[in-house]
Amino acid sequence: MATLTSEDEGKILVDVEGEEFGVVTEVESNTAWVDPDPGLGDAVLAALGWSERDGDDYTVEGDLVDTVTEGEIRVNVDL
């Protein structure tokens, strides 16, 4: 399990199979909000910490996270 922080905003969420599921738009209380269909502008804004979660985003709890690298958050389940 990894702890998610605001530093993880803008990273790509990847499942255990390596499939990409979206971009993290916001992190709060070890929960990531993920935009499943970001445009290029959305991804850039999230990477800069300038985006906010919206109704289309879904959540991923920190206890599902296996590893966090410079560019991605990998969960330990098959989404």
Image (spheres, rainbow, N blue to C red):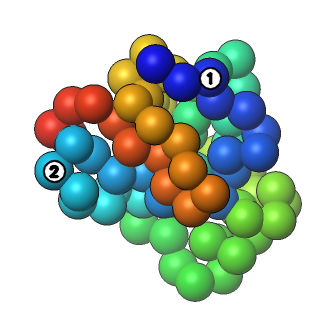
Using the rendered view, name the quadrant where residue 18 is placed: bottom left
Taking 47 as reference, is 24 left or right? left
Q: For the residue marked with disc 2, what is the amino acid?
A: Glu
Q: Residue placed at 16% from the left, 50% from the top? A: 17
Callout 1 secondary element: loop
* Residue 1 pos. (x, y %): 46, 19
28 above or below 71? Answer: above
Residue 59: tell me if it is visible: yes
72 above or below 6? Answer: below
50 above or below 40? Answer: above
Callout 2 secondary element: loop
* Residue 45 pos. (x, y %): 75, 70
Name which of mark 1 and mark 2 comes first in the sequence.
1
Q: Residue placed at 58% from the left, 83% from the top? A: 40
Residue at the bottom extreme? 40
Q: How crowded is mark 2: few (under 14 residues within 10 Å), some or many (20 or more)?
A: few
CA separation in Å, label 1 and label 2: 21 Å
Q: Which label is found at residue 35?
A: none
* Residue 62 pos. (x, y %): 51, 22
Instruction: Give the residue pinned by disc 1.
Output: 3
Instruction: Give the residue pinned by disc 2.
Output: 17
Total labels: the figure holds 2
Q: Residue placed at 62% from the left, 23% from the top? A: 3
Quick check: marks 1 and 2 in contact, CB under 8 Å? no
Foreground residue among 1 and 14: 1
Using the rendered view, name the quadrant where residue 21 is placed: bottom left
Q: For the residue marked with disc 1, what is the amino acid?
A: Thr
Foreground residue among 54 and 29: 29
